[in-house]
Amino acid sequence: MTAPESRPKTQPDDRPAQAVRVADHLEKHPHSTQKEIDAVCDTGCISKVLSDMPRPELVGMGYGLAYGWRTVPCANGSRTRQVRTYALLHRPRTQPDLFTPT
């Protein structure tokens, strides 16, 4: 008889879980770029997560995001470019279930 594996069960890393991690990061570090967010949150495709976050019709979404721009140096500092930044305005509101009696 072999002993059961003591490996912890992995949690599903679905889009709502990724959005929570991104929102937590944006609360602490507003006006972050996609590159900065992805380095910390490891979402796989940060652009998909950020585009889904404001959509209330998706389960677990409905975040309020503010968008801005930041000038960053490029080409060894000889030029600059504009990079999109993101900030969290609000988290999704939890709606009561109208069909479940309380």
Image (tube, rainbow, N blue to C red):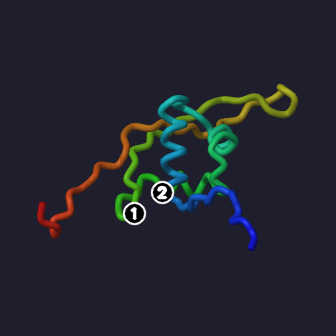
Say whether residue 92 is left or right of residue 7: left
Q: Foreground: 89 or 95?
A: 95
| Above or below, 40 relative to 5 | above
Around disc 2, counting alpha carbons within 10 Å, would you say few (fewer than 14), some (14 to 19), or many (20 or more)? some
Q: Which residue is the extreme one toward the left?
A: 101
Q: Residue at x 51, y 54 (%)?
A: 17
Q: Residue 67 in the image: x percent, y percent? A: 49, 40
Could you tell me if the residues under marks 2 and 1 are in contact, i.e. CB atoms within 8 Å? yes
Write down the residue under mark 1: 59
Q: Residue 39 in the image: x percent, y percent? A: 70, 41
Q: Residue 24 in the image: x percent, y percent? A: 50, 38
Q: Is mark 1 on a helix, strand or loop?
A: loop
Looking at the rendering, in which quadrant would you find the C terminus?
Answer: bottom left
Amino acid type, mark 1: Val
- Number of marks drawn: 2
Q: Looking at the rendered structure, which numbered label has been put on residue 16?
A: 2
Question: What is the quadrant of residue 36 in the picture?
Answer: top right
Q: Which residue is the extreme one toward the bottom?
A: 1
Q: Residue 12 in the image: x percent, y percent? A: 56, 62
